[in-house]
Image (cartoon, rainbow, N blue to C red):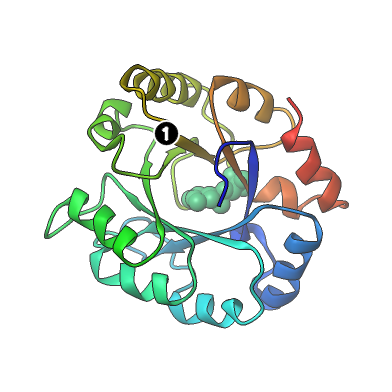
Amino acid sequence: MVLNMTRVSASILSADLSRLGDEVCRVKAAGADMLHIDVMDGIFVPPMTIGDVVVSSLNKTKNITFDTHLMLSRPERSIPLFAQAGSDIISIHVESDYEKGLQNALELIKKSGCKAGLAINPPTPIEKAFPFIGIADVFVIMSVNPGYGGQAFIPQSLNKIESLRNKAENLGINAVIEVDGGINEKTAPAVIKAGADILVSGNYLFASVNMKAAVESLRLL
Ligand code: DX5
Ligand code: ZN
């Protein structure tokens, strides 16, 4: 998997979930690089979304990268299940609880054959992610508070992207940065300029009449 150019990950949180299979086909036809799968447990965030059983069913027709974002209070037990369900990237939160520690959980993701992502919420200082540079494969900087699609981009997220990019460069490590929340054709250019490699977009893509054009608009600087 090449992870060093701007890529678009379409969040199915904003899809018509009563027609999930068709919506995934729409994402593939639009040329998105990844399918962003938001998993919520009703504890880490209030909503409950979809689980590993549904992800497995999507896997039957898979030819797109599965970018699974676990918004779970205690993600460790779920990691093998989402790996087995066909995830390529599994991201867990720095704010979640870990019996055996966050580093161990990131290593478990890698041992399960997936890229390990570390997600960080807007109120959490970016410095909390620094010890995991060189350990996590991907950093997911949340640019909205997690739980809901269609929220406005939080502009302070740009500083966090830049700080993480600079810190990784100073360490001589090529960190992959994904930015999640409020991404559209207006917010994307600054996010890419700040150092993002992967843009997650839900509401903007799924509300578009022409999803292919919407995906392309996010790749433009
Ligand atoms: C928020 C989710 C995001 C969200 C992005 O909890 O993690 O992935 O669905 O959707 P938009 O682009 O609508 O902010
Ligand atoms: Zn997400």
Residue at image mark 1: 175
Query: Visible in this render: residue 55?
Result: yes
Tell me: residue 174, above or below residue 216: above
Left or right placement of residue 68 versus residue 10 in this view: left
Is 96 in front, or is 36?
36
Indicate whether 66 appears above or below 133. Answer: below
Q: Is residue 49 above or below residue 13?
A: below
Count of number-bearing discs: 1
Provide residue 62's location: percent of width, then percent of height: 64, 73
Q: Quadrant of residue 90?
A: bottom left
Residue 153 is situated, as x and y percent measured from the top left of the image, at 57, 32
Which of 91 and 15 lies nearest the eye of the viewer? Answer: 91
Residue 40 lies in quadrant: bottom left
Q: Is residue 111 left or right of residue 31?
A: left
Residue occupying the point 12% across, 60% down: 99
Percent position (x, y) of residue 121? Answer: 37, 39
Q: Quadrant of the C terminus?
A: top right
Decide which of 119, 5 is in the foreground and name it: 5
User: Circle 1: is it few (<14), some (14-19), or many (20+) Cα within 10 Å?
Assistant: many
> Does residue 22 lie above or below 146 as drawn?
below
Check disc 1 and report its element: helix, strand or loop. loop
Q: Is mark 1 within 8 Å of ligand 2?
A: no
Q: Residue at x 51, y 40 (%)?
A: 178
Coordinates of residue 207 in the picture (x, y in percent) = 77, 52
Residue at point 51%, 29% (across, down): 154
| Amino acid type, label 1 | Ala
Q: Residue at x 32, y 49 (%)?
A: 93
- Residue 148 shows in the view: no
Q: Is residue 102 left or right of residue 159?
A: left
